[in-house]
Amino acid sequence: MLVRAAGSSGLRIVRRCIDAVELLAAARADGAVPVILSAGLPRLTVGLVDDLRAGRSIVGLASDEEQRRLLQGLGVSSVVSVDGDPERTMAVVSRRLRDTGVAPAAADTAPSDGDEAIPPPGGLIAVWGPQGAPGRTTVAIGVAGALARQGLRVCLVDADTYAPSAAMALGVVADVSGLVVACHRADLDSASPESIGALAIPAGDRLSILTGLTEPAQWSDLRGRACPVLWSHLRAAFDACVVDTGFCLDPPEEGQWSRPRNAAGRSAVECADRVIAVAEGSAMGAARLVASWPHARSLADGRVQVVRNRVARRAALPSSRAWGHAIRSGGIDADVREIPDDPKAVRRAWDQARTPNEVAPRSRLSQALDGLAAGLRLSPARVGLTTRLVAG
C-alpha cells in the first residue's frame, strides 16, 4: 500500500528488496539513489546501514516505538511512523527527503504554474477468477479492448501459468514468452519503461500484448521477485495494463526447493489498482468463488470488482439477488457486475482473433464490457520523471 501511494507524493519506487543483501546490491548499482528502509527487513546490521548511508539519504519506516528505537540504534536518524493512511505516510517521507536535499521531482521536470502535481502513472488491472474456466481471459481481453476504444494505450499481459491463451485468442504467435523476457529484463538495473514496453506486440488499435508462456511447463523460467518492478515499468509505459492471471493464488510452500508457480498472479493481484474477480453465473460458480476467496481477499485488500459472467436468460440460473446473497454469505462484500452469456459473439471473437468489442460492438456482451471498463475510471496518463528510490 505504501508503494502504491508513493506516486501521489512524487516518488517512484524502482526496486523492492526482500532482504538487506538484495537491498545493498541494488543500492550499490546506483550510488546516489535514496533508500526507504523498513525496520522489518531481514538481515539488517549497523555495518550495512553504514554502507548504505555513504553518499545517500535514508528514511526509516517504523510501525511502533520498538521499531523506531531499532532503526535509530542501527544509525538511521530520520524515521517516519507508519499510520493507517499510506498517502499521508509517504507525504511525510517525501518531506524528509526534501529536508535532506533530495527533491521528489527533478528540477527540469518541476510542475509549472497552474500544475497541481505530477500525474499518476497508468492503472494496473488484474483479472482473476477461481478454477472452472469462468471466462477470465475473455473478460480480460474484453476489458483491454474496451479501454483501447476509450483512447487509452493498453497492454494486455498473459500471466496465467496454468493455461496461457490470451495471445492465441488475439492471433499473436510468439516463439519466445514476452513475460519471461520482461521479468528477466526487469531484474536488471538498466531496465526502463521504454525497454519493457518495447516487448509488447501490437494486437490492435492502441492495444498491445505481452505474450505469456509458450507452454505451461515454462513457469519455472519466471522471476517472481521481478514482477513488482515489471508492473511499475508497464504502468509508466502504458495508460493501462490488464493482467490475465491464473486461477491459483495459493502462497508457495516453504522450503529450500520450493518454486513459486503462482508468483506472477499473486504479485499482479497484490500490486493492482483494481482486481476484477470473474465467476461463472451459476450456483456452482458462486460456490467456487467463495471457496477461492480467502487468498484473493488477503492480496487485493478491498480493491475488488466481482463479475458474474455468462448470465443467461433462463430460469435454471439463480437470480441476481440469490447469487449475490450466496457470495455475501461466504464473506464477499464487493460490488457485482453481470456479463450476459453471448456465445455467438465470443465464438466470433475467437474465430477472428479479435476482441469482442471489435466483432460485435453492439452486442449485449460488448456493452457490458464497455460498462465494466468505464467503471474503472482510467484516463490517459501523463507520466512525469520522479525521484528514483530503492525500498527495503
Image (cartoon, rainbow, N blue to C red):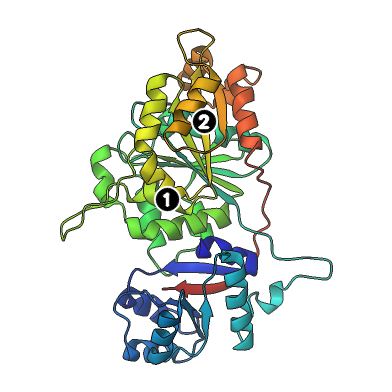
Task: Give the Cα separation between the discs numbered 1 and 2.
Answer: 18 Å
From the top left corner, tell me how far across and down residue 192 is, in percent: 50, 63
Please tell me which residue is depicted at 43% across the width and 89% down the height of the picture: 72
Please tell me which residue is depicted at 38% across the width and 49% down the height of the picture: 266
Name the side, left or right, on which 238 lies relative to 109: left
User: Label 1 amino acid?
Assistant: Leu
Name the side, left or right, on which 390 lies relative to 357: left
> Does residue 32 sit above or below 148 in this rendering?
below
**Disc 2 marks which residue?**
307
Residue at the right extreme, as displayed: 114
Q: For this rendering, which residue is in front, 197 or 136? A: 136
**Residue count near mark 1 (Cα–Cα under 10 Å), binned few <14, some 14–19, many ≥20:** some
Whether residue 164 is visible: no
Q: Tell me the quarter of the picture where residue 223 sits.
A: bottom left
Label annotation for residue 255? none
From the top left corner, tell me how far across and down residue 328 is, in percent: 48, 33
From the top left corner, tell me how far across and down residue 235 is, in percent: 55, 54
From the top left corner, tell me how far across and down residue 361 is, in percent: 64, 21
> Does residue 96 sit above or below 308 in this rendering?
below
Residue at the top extreme, as displayed: 315
**Residue count near mark 2 (Cα–Cα under 10 Å), binned few <14, some 14–19, many ≥20:** many
User: Label 2 amino acid?
Assistant: Val
Q: Secondary structure at mark 1?
A: helix
Please tell me which residue is depicted at 33% across the width and 77% down the height of the picture: 20
Q: Tell me the quarter of the picture where residue 153 sits.
A: top right
Label annotation for residue 299? 1
Count how many numbered circles sit on residues in the image: 2
